[in-house]
Image (tube, rainbow, N blue to C red):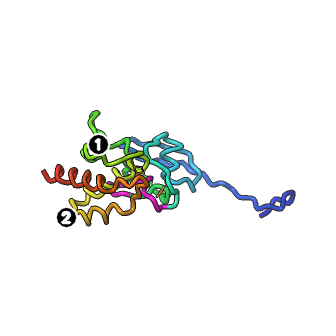
Amino acid sequence: MADPAKNTPLTAVMTADVTLDVNGAPHTLHLDVRTTLLDALRDHLNLTGTKKGCDLGQCGACTVLVDGRPVVSCLTLAATQQGRAITTIEGLERDGKLHPVQEAFIEHDAFQCGYCTPGQIMAAVGLLNEGVPATDAAIRERMSGNLCRCGAYVNIVEAVKAAAAAQKG
Ligand code: FES
Ligand code: FES
């Protein structure tokens, strides 16, 4: 169907109520059904710790956990995530104490500008949720979807190793 006055196609925006479980709390949002999880978090819930880098699924800056596993939120539609447990960088601390991976990133100076850091930390937490990697190469491989323009990779691997060692006990 076209607008005869302008001869341009008319598009209807479909919206829906979407309830997201974010950091342990439910939030019902009225969203354009095309809204990404990243935009829902940042623009509708004001959880701006999750960063937008490429918005194309290529940099990992927007990584969050869904049911404990890392996903790139820029390629995930918010409306498809109802009923799942979403964790952002803001949801990692417990009783005012940073998550061990956050502590390890600070201890090992695993960032420079910090823009990629929330995504790196969420990817690392997701990685450790699935078990401790046996080698540095395995850590690098598992973290390879998270780019760091500052080149902090060496210290990021050290931080993940330290957090893994702490998890092992
Ligand atoms: S912003 Fe999502 S992968 Fe780059
Ligand atoms: S610390 Fe700057 S992009 Fe990674």
Q: Secondary structure at mark 2?
A: loop
Tell me where residue 100 appears, x and y as whole percent: 24, 45
Q: How many neighbours does mark 1 have within 10 angstroms: few (below 14), some (14-19), or many (20 or more)?
A: some
First in sequence, mark 2 or 1: give its number.
1
In the picture, which quadrant includes the N terminus? bottom right
Q: Secondary structure at mark 1?
A: helix
Q: Which mark is residue 106?
A: 1
Disc number placed over residue 136 in the picture, else none: none
Q: Residue furthest left?
A: 169
* Observer-nearest of 22 and 82: 22
Q: Is residue 69 above or below residue 29?
A: below
Check disc 2: other Cα within 10 Å, few if <14, some if 14-19, many if 20+.
few
Say which amino acid is labelled 2: Ala
Write the start and end of the magenta stretch as one range: 57-70
- The structure residue drawn at horizontal position 35% and vertical position 47%, both measured from the top left corner, is 111
Residue 7: % across, % down: 83, 62
* Left or right placement of residue 169 versus residue 27 in this view: left
* Whether residue 121 is situated above or below residue 135 in the rendered picture: above
The residue that disc 2 covers is 134
User: Farthest top residue?
Assistant: 96
